Image: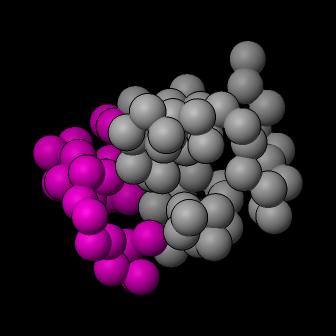
Amino acid sequence: MTERNVDRNLIPNDVVSRTVDGASPARAWREHLDFTQADLAARLGISQSAYARQENSDRVRNSSREKIAAALAISAKQLDF
């Protein structure tokens, strides 16, 4: 089971490795924390397809990044690398 109590100043090696392999930071964190797109969409109050567009976007608004970070229980800075 993945540790859910994430240090809000660190980025785990697993997350970095996933981004090196081509995943967006949001996807890397989501997969690292064992969430599905549907899980995150439900936490954000949006559809799975709307979340998928945000997760795969090259340009995520700061407000969206903050909401995604909150849903993942990480800091927005941890999504911005």
Q: Give the residue at the far top of this rendering.
A: 1
Residue at x 61% of width, y 40% of height: 15
Q: Give the residue at the far bottom of this rendering.
A: 62
User: Looking at the picture, how far across and down is residue 40, in whole percent?
Assistant: 41, 45
Q: Quadrant of residue 73?
A: bottom right
Q: Is residue 47 left or right of residue 79?
A: left
Q: Is residue 10 left or right of residue 32?
A: right
Q: Is residue 44 magenta?
A: yes
Residue at x 23% of width, y 60% of height: 57
Q: Which residues are magenta?
A: 37-65
Q: Give the residue at the far front of this rendering.
A: 20
User: Looking at the picture, how far across and down is residue 30, in whole percent?
Assistant: 50, 40
Number of labels in the image equals: 0
* The C terminus: image quadrant: bottom right
Could you say which is closer to the camera, residue 14 or residue 6? 14
The chief SS type of the magenta part is helix
Vertical placement of 37 versus 68: above or below? above
Q: Is residue 61 left or right of residue 26?
A: left
Q: Is residue 40 magenta?
A: yes
Could you say which is closer to the camera, residue 30 or residue 46? 30
User: Looking at the picture, how far across and down is residue 17, in whole percent?
Assistant: 58, 34
Residue at x 48% of width, y 43% of height: 19
Residue at x 37% of width, y 39% of height: 22
Vertical placement of 79 versus 41: above or below? below
